[in-house]
Amino acid sequence: MPIEKTRETTRMIFQSMIALASAALGLVAALAWNDAIKETMKQILGEDESLSAKYTYAILATLIGVIVVVVLARVAAKVGGEATISREAEG
């Protein structure tokens, strides 16, 4: 096997490992935020486990997620990076 092919394969393996580790850490962070938001909702709404409380939590979590993604996309644009999400209306 030529050295260049070996280097390319090694590079691809490391890139895959980094992507998998990043995804795993992202999942851990998401689960931690999930717990934090749930506990906050319990303190605000009490121990309510009703369907409306679950929808309130889902809506709040969605709003927080959208706001964080938009802020991070703007920060990425300011530092010269490319955001994963781009808006079509901003042509």
Image: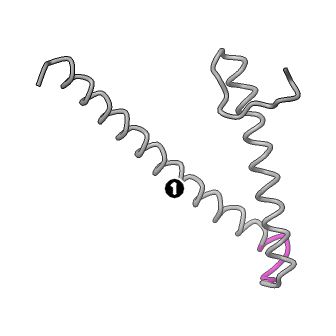
Residue at horizontal 32%, vertical 31%? 12
The vertical placement of 58 against 78, above or below, is below
Mark 1 — residue?
28
The residue type indicated by label 1 comes to Val
Q: Is residue 5 left or right of residue 60?
A: left
The foreground one among 87 and 79 is: 87
What is the x, y in percent for residue 90?
86, 24
What is the x, y in percent for residue 52?
87, 78
Residue at horizontal 72%, vertical 17%? 78
What is the x, y in percent for residue 7?
22, 22
Q: Is residue 77 left or right of residue 7?
A: right
Q: Is residue 41 left or right of residue 79?
A: right
Image: magenta residue range: 42-48
Q: Quadrant of the C terminus?
A: top right
Q: Secondary structure at mark 1?
A: helix
- Name the quadrant containing residue 15: top left
